[in-house]
Image (tube, rainbow, N blue to C red):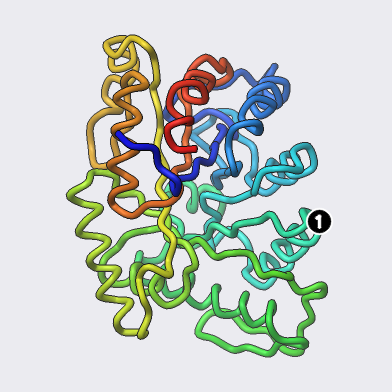
Amino acid sequence: MTASHRLQFGYNPPTGDRLIEPVDPRTYTKDLQGVLDVASRYFSSLWISDHHMTGDRFRLECWSVLMWVAARYPGPLLGTCVMANSYRHPPLLAKMVASLQYLSSGRFIFGYGAGWTEEEYVAYGYEFPSARERIAQLDDGVRVIKALWTESPATYKGAYYAVKDAYCEPRPDPPPPLMLAGDGERYMLRVVAEHADWWLSYARRPEVQRRKLAVLAEHCKSFGRDPATIKKAAPLTVYLDRDRAAARNRAGAKLEGENPAFAGDPSEFRDHLAQIEELGFELVQLSFAGFPETDDLKLFADEVLPYFA
């Protein structure tokens, strides 16, 4: 395999218990800082997920963790993967993002999506309309946010959100790249084609990715847009070990389904990432199953990352 000069890597730490492994609430802050001390040396970006709860288990709120990370690690880019439109009033979110862009000297990538976890919505008192309506709300949210970032004062009235003579000062300079997540072929990818600077795809099997990319390209035609102007990113859960069988045994059922994890040795992982790159993806956000240990992360840095440097 030849060395690559395009694929970048982000690190996505847990904000609490997740499907990979639980965390220890008694040591989580110390554990997170220890892992980020290592990850910030190797990854071009750090990403925080947006969920309020995982059942009754320990979990911290996305924006709070992001602020903690931004203050401690001034080098890498910062991103959300991704913030649910429903969870924060979009005009307020526009102000939050503009403030972070200012405080971080322009390091933010704004990951944004329509939301999907019905249990979480209901538990926290959010309405949970159909996927079609949530995508329409996302589209309207993007429009009002962009109005606040580009007009002073901003006046906008959409189907769901409105502002009148609203100031968002300082407006973000430059505006953060907008990364939209989701791959619904009829509606979501059309919103991506119209608005996104980045697309975050959750469909990881190559044959599915190829179809989604083709659908996105068709939607881009509707807006006279070259699909190559949209950068592509994908998240990936990683079980990395020098012993391939040990990695696969640990991953177990997480190797199945539409969005399987990767499990294997460094050589296999290099080949797997090369396939992702060949599809046209430019960023992979990695979640390592070993947290809070860093053996797998260091193995990636030593034996995988140099092939993409």
The image quadrant where one finds the N terminus is top left
The residue depicted at 49 percent of the width and 53 percent of the height is: 121
159 versus 243 height, above or below: below
- The image quadrant that residue 250 belongs to is top left
The residue depicted at 60 percent of the width and 41 percent of the height is: 46
Write down the residue under mark 1: 103
* Residue 239 pos. (x, y %): 39, 22
Q: Is residue 287 found left or right of 59 in the rendered image?
A: left
Residue at the left extreme of this rendering:
207
226 versus 80 height, above or below: below
Closer to the camera, 112 or 116?
112
* Residue 291 pos. (x, y %): 54, 21
Closer to the camera, 91 or 231?
231
* Residue 49 pos. (x, y %): 55, 44
The residue tagged with tag 1: helix, strand or loop? helix
Q: Badge 1, how many Cα within 10 Å: few under 14, some, many 20+?
A: some
The residue depicted at 31 percent of the width and 20 percent of the height is: 264
Q: Is residue 48 found left or right of 189 in the rendered image?
A: right
* Residue 272 pos. (x, y %): 30, 34
Closer to the camera, 50 or 79?
79
Residue at the front extreme of this rendering:
2
Q: For the image shown, how many numbered marks are present on the structure?
A: 1
The residue depicted at 34 percent of the width and 47 percent of the height is: 277
Closer to the camera, 120 or 172?
172
155 versus 121 height, above or below: below
Disc 1 residue type? Leu
